Amino acid sequence: MKGLVYAIAVTVAVTGAASAQSVADRLNDYPTAARADYVFACMVTNGQTREMLDRCACSIDEIASILPYAQYLQAETVLSMRRVGGERMAIFQSASMAEHLVADMRRAQAEAEIVCF
């Protein structure tokens, strides 16, 4: 009986640790360089002050809590391809999937702006 209790306790501990790790991974799946790029671009747009550093860092943290990094990266790619232009890039202008990716990112950015700015 004592062995069974020990086995259950170990299983619960391992499951809890795996669950906690997956939550932490989910909340911090943005690479540091991606967060830094966002903060630098935000500060160029809004001013290079300590206050803006804090607000821009808050903004990317808020976006990261809403969008998984893979989805953020896809939306950034769509926006980047839209800037290139040309016939080959027309798919990024009108494709439904591209529109949804960008719309989700815009909503996350709007929420981050409300919270942080």
Image: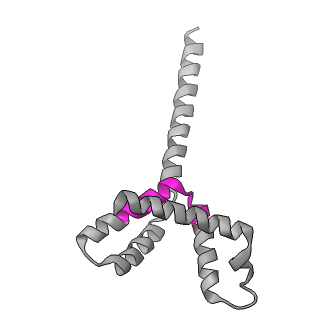
| Outermost residue toward the bottom in this view | 86
**Residue 12, relative to residue 115: is it above or below?**
above
Look at the magenta stretch and give its main secondary structure.
Answer: helix
Q: Is residue 69 magenta?
A: yes
**Residue 84, relative to residue 71: is it above or below?**
below
| Outermost residue toward the top in this view | 1
| Outermost residue toward the left in this view | 50
Which quadrant of the structure image shows residue 7?
top right
| Residue placed most toward the observer, 31 or 83 | 83
Residue range of the region highlighted in magenta in the rendering: 57-72
Residue 73 is situated, as x and y percent measured from the top left of the image, at 59, 68
Which quadrant of the structure image shows residue 111?
bottom left
- At a point 30% along the width and 64% down the height, the residue shown is 54
- At a point 53% along the width and 50% down the height, the residue shown is 26
**Residue 12, relative to residue 36: is it above or below?**
above
Give the colour scheme shown.
one colour
Residue 60 is situated, as x and y percent measured from the top left of the image, at 43, 63
| Residue placed most toward the observer, 107 or 51 | 107
Q: From the viewer's perspective, tell me whether residue 100 is left or right of residue 49.
A: right
- At a point 55% along the width and 10% down the height, the residue shown is 2
**Residue 97, relative to residue 42: is it above or below?**
above
| Residue placed most toward the observer, 69 or 103 | 103
Q: From the viewer's perspective, tell me whether residue 16 is left or right of residue 37.
A: right
Q: Quadrant of the C terminus?
A: bottom left
Residue 108 is situated, as x and y percent measured from the top left of the image, at 51, 60
